[in-house]
Amino acid sequence: MRRYLIVGSGVAGVSAAQTLRRLDPAGEVTMVSYDPFGYYSRPGLAYYLTNEIGEKQLFPFQEKDWQALKIRRLRAWVSRLHPAEHRLELSDGASLVYDRLLLATGSQALPLGIPGADLEGVVKLDDLADARRILNLCKRARRAIVIGGAITALELVEGLRACRLQVTYLLRGSRYWSGVLDETEARLVERRLAEEGVHILPHTELAAFQGQRGRLTGAVTTTGQHIPCDLAAAAIGIAPRKELAAAAGLRTERGILVNDYLETSAPDIYAAGDVAQIVDPLTGEAALDTLWGPARRSGAAAAQNMAGEAARYLKQVPFNVTRLAGLPVTIIGRVGQGADQDVAGIVRGDSETWRQLPNAIIVEQSYEVNRLRLLVGERALVGAVVMGDQTLSRPIYELVRGGVDLSSCREALFSSPRPAEVIGEFWRSWRAQSET
Ligand SMILES: Cc1cc2nc3c(=O)[nH]c(=O)nc-3n(C[C@H](O)[C@H](O)[C@H](O)COP(=O)(O)OP(=O)(O)OC[C@H]3O[C@@H](n4cnc5c(N)ncnc54)[C@H](O)[C@@H]3O)c2cc1C
């Protein structure tokens, strides 16, 4: 009987456990994680903060689902990995041996390395414990600041506004999420935030937090401006939790390096999810995907290989459905020019890829809050930002993913006053043809 060990109870670890159970019903599967809450939706934390969903709804599994899975679950911190002995060491000194190991340790928020960051009232949003802490602090806090330029920061802004706090949002640059959104999209989001009563401060960087008796009372910017606040939430990027692997001598870069089969540099050890840095067939480079969907798929693929199948994992075109200032937004494929760590999975086409596509052209259609930005390459669509009306998100995703040749509609796309209709029509006829 094969012994499988999984470190991490996030979506990558759980989808691996499900796949292992299916492929090897007799195998012994153990899952270790130090998170007291086990498996829950991390994307759902944003909606939990705004009180749109309750805590129960964060949990995809009920007890009966765990029982059906028939795995052993341990709550423990894994402190060391001994690849040569096929053994893990837990913080209480106990050992676990394995035949096949999956590292699905995820990623965590980068710390804000400024004085006072350890004061009570300075928070991040990584896990359910953080979300609970924020909601607790909101009961007596009145003024909050939020630091960070991408999705999680905005989710914090919205969560704190929903708790009726006065919120000041600090942006290091001139506008929101400049690595992904263009000027118009960013201003659209900022305008909506302002309408919700959020005070935005561009070109603002923090130098230190200030406090009294261990509690946050304010922040000071690099230009000496004092901002009183009793809650400060930071989301300045994320870092894969690769320490365990790195300390054991496995090959790592930003994450744990894996090949197409999710194998690390050590025999019988695999990595999946946010922590795995996987070769991207589009660029030939090893990139991170820090999104729920890819974490689920890579966990399942790693498990197939652990169980003895030869399953290549191919990265897919990024497809990120999110909500910015109340507006549904889908980001598809290659957009943006920055390499903000918080969006590593989204802006896979960062400046380098962008430079490889000098002929990409932007087609825009804008009316009220519905906006579509198509990035059109020489032959095919390379990406899109769909704001508001989401009718075209899936069709555009299919066209980008399939690298579908747009030659027959390219001219119309650029000359028509309604490019959205042109692309919709093109997709309908392309799909009809591919179905025949
Ligand atoms: C606030 C927030 C919003 C998000 N929104 C979106 C979204 O809208 N769309 C989207 O696609 N993605 C979103 N994401 C990202 C998405 O949640 C992640 O990509 C996904 O959860 C990664 O899953 P994972 O299994 O790789 O890692 P994780 O879910 O991070 O799980 C890692 C596990 O490893 C355990 N662990 C780590 N180190 C150790 C150790 N040494 N010993 C024991 N256990 C250990 C942890 O306890 C945890 O159980 C969001 C994330 C956050 C935090």
Image (cartoon, helix red, strand yellow):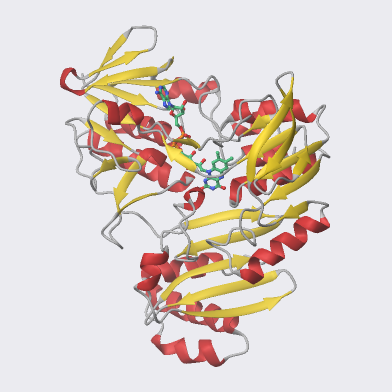
Q: Position of residue 430 (x, y in %)?
A: 43, 78
Q: In which quarter of the image is the N terminus?
A: top left
Taking the spot 39% from the left edge, 79% from the top edge, the residue there is 358
Above or below for 428 versus 49: below
Closer-to-camera residue (90/431) = 90
Left or right: residue 197 versus residue 97 is: right
Left or right: residue 15 versus residue 229 is: left
How many numbered circles does the render carry? 0
**Residue 7 shows up from this direction:** yes
* Residue 88 found in image quarter: top left
Taking the spot 19% from the left edge, 37% from the top edge, the residue there is 265
Q: Position of residue 335 (x, y in %)?
A: 48, 66
* Residue 116 found in image quarter: top right
Q: In which quarter of the image is the C terminus?
A: bottom left
Taking the spot 55% from the left edge, 31% from the top edge, the residue there is 40
**Residue 436 shows up from this direction:** no
Left or right: residue 28 versus residue 109 is: left
Left or right: residue 64 versus residue 55 is: left
Closer-to-camera residue (313/164) = 164
Closer-to-camera residue (187/145) = 145
Taking the spot 52% from the left edge, 75% from the top edge, the residue there is 374
* Residue 195 found in image quarter: bottom right
Above or below for 425 versus 285: below
The single residue placed furthest to the front in the displayed view is: 224
Q: Where is residue 237 in the image (x, y as percent from the top left)?
A: 52, 44
Closer-to-camera residue (68/304) = 304
